[in-house]
Amino acid sequence: MIGMINLYFIGSAGSGKSTLTNAFIGWMQQHGYDAITVNLDPGIENAPYVPDIDIRDWIRLRDIMREYGVGPNGAQVIAADMLAMNIKEMKEIIDSFETEYVIFDTPGQMELFVLRQSGKLLVESLGADNSIIGFLYDPVISKTPSGIITLMLQAASVQVRFNVPFLSILTKSDLLEEAERKKILTWSRDLIELDDAIHGEFPTVRSQLSIEFLSALKSFGAEQQLIPVSSTYGYGMEDIYNAAQKIYHGGEDLSRG
């Protein structure tokens, strides 16, 4: 039986992980659902929410920089590897909440969580069988055919890396014109439309590579049903919740507190 659901927000720097974490936990609480937040970014400053569990209680970048004599980037890599040392204690604290959802705000530099072994170890240790990855599509990058193909490749690599249920989320969609939003959503679920669009781009080496990458995505079956959200205006939060519930509870609603 599935207990608490672990929802990991993963995306490139600037894609809106922290603001989405804040918006989603706010929506959950407003609607009477029990959820907690976990900050996994030791370098975050001025987070828009107060984490219930914070990696900075164990690991701080400035301490690592001082102790190891490295700069911010080197400290981030060391911090990512040090995460594994604190998983057991973190799991004990998470379990003590007996909550329904655990929302994880992952590091700003996506590769630190996705490619370092500690990220995969964390997901497995906390329960891959009750985990979901919410992959964030940056709206600015998604506006061009080559841009969205790049994000789809990243999403596919994350999906292969963790092998858990997957949600694709178009963040900051309020920044897009309605026509732009519709175009992005069409591309994400219809690779033939995306193929036509990429062939319409000005012929460059980059667009030729995009065509080849798109061919690989077709064979992978990488069509995604993007969920458009806005952390600013709060829309799309219910869609994330419903999609997560469908994965593990067949769409049944949680009991409200």
Image (cartoon, rainbow, N blue to C red):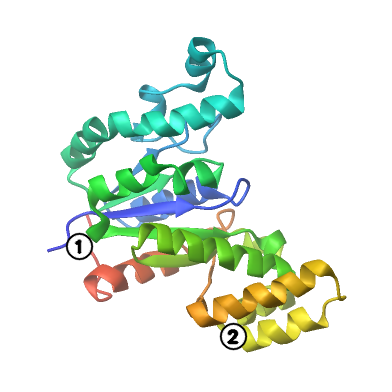
The reply to whether residue 141 is visible in this rendering is: yes
On residue 190, which mark appears? 2
Mark 1, other Cα within 10 Å: few <14 / some 14–19 / many ≥20: few
Residue 6 in picture, x, y percent from top left: 30, 53
Residue 207 in picture, x, y percent from top left: 78, 72
Rendering quarter of residue 182: bottom right
| Residue at disc 1, secondary structure | loop
Rendering quarter of residue 251: bottom left
Residue drawn at 57 percent across, 65 percent down: 153
Seen in the image, is 133 located left or right of residue 252? right
Seen in the image, is 20 located left or right of residue 201? left
Residue 179 in picture, x, y percent from top left: 73, 78
> Circle 1 is placed at which residue position?
255
Q: Quadrant of the C terminus?
A: bottom left
Residue drawn at 53 percent across, 72 percent down: 226
Which amino acid lies under the numbered mark 2 shown in the image of this protein? Asp
Residue 134 in picture, x, y percent from top left: 44, 59
The reply to whether residue 36 is visible in this rendering is: no
Seen in the image, is 255 located left or right of residue 60? left
Mark 1 or mark 2, earlier in chain: 2
Q: Nearer the viewer, residue 207 or 1?
A: 207
Residue drawn at 29 percent across, 30 percent down: 86
Q: Is residue 238 above or below residue 27?
A: below
Which amino acid lies under the numbered mark 1 shown in the image of this protein? Ser
